[in-house]
Image (cartoon, rainbow, N blue to C red):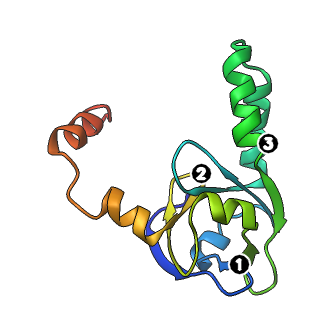
Amino acid sequence: MFAGSHQLSIDDKGRLAIPARFRAQLDGANVFITRAHKPCLEIYPASEFHRLAEQIEGLEDRVKADVLKEVFIGHAVETEVDKQGRVLLPQLLRKYAALDGTVMVVGQIKRFDVWSESSWQKKFGGAPAAENLADAFALLKR
């Protein structure tokens, strides 16, 4: 499970060092990096990405399936985690998410997200609206 947040840097070549405890959760040397509906990148273990791709392919709503194929699948890049635990974030995806310098890597259970520090601060820097958070927690059976 990917959990927690890490403030990290992208090097001059566009590489990101994946936190060690996240690397331990990967099921192989390859990951998929893509974009979604948020201004960040999503990084998936290969097996999870393939599972989602199969779900998309099986959707009955062809219009929504096509949107997911165009954005989620169409922008995805399969890449290898190098021996130092780094991945190269493709320039097109870095540009989309405005990634340069310091980033926030945030666990999302089955994937982790990479946010520009400024976008992350805008979205999460303040306290969440108490009612939204309470409504979300109300969905959980604890």
* Residue 31, quarter of picture: bottom right
Q: Amino acid at mark 3?
A: Gly
Q: Nearer the viewer, mark 3 or mark 2?
A: 3
Contact, mark 1 vs mark 3 (Cβ under 8 Å): no
SS under mark 3 = loop
Q: Is residue 138 left or right of residue 108?
A: left
Residue at image coords 66%, 86%: 11
Pointer 3 local density, CA inside 10 Å: few below 14, some 14–19, many at least 20: few
x and y percent of residue 19 in the render?
59, 77
What residue sits right under mark 2 in the picture? 110
Q: Amino acid at mark 2?
A: Lys
What residue sits right under mark 1 in the picture? 14
SS under mark 2 = loop
- The quarter in which the C terminus is drawn is top left
* Residue 137, quarter of picture: top left
What residue sits right under mark 3 in the picture? 74
* Residue 96, quarter of picture: bottom right
Relative to 117, is 122 above or below?
above
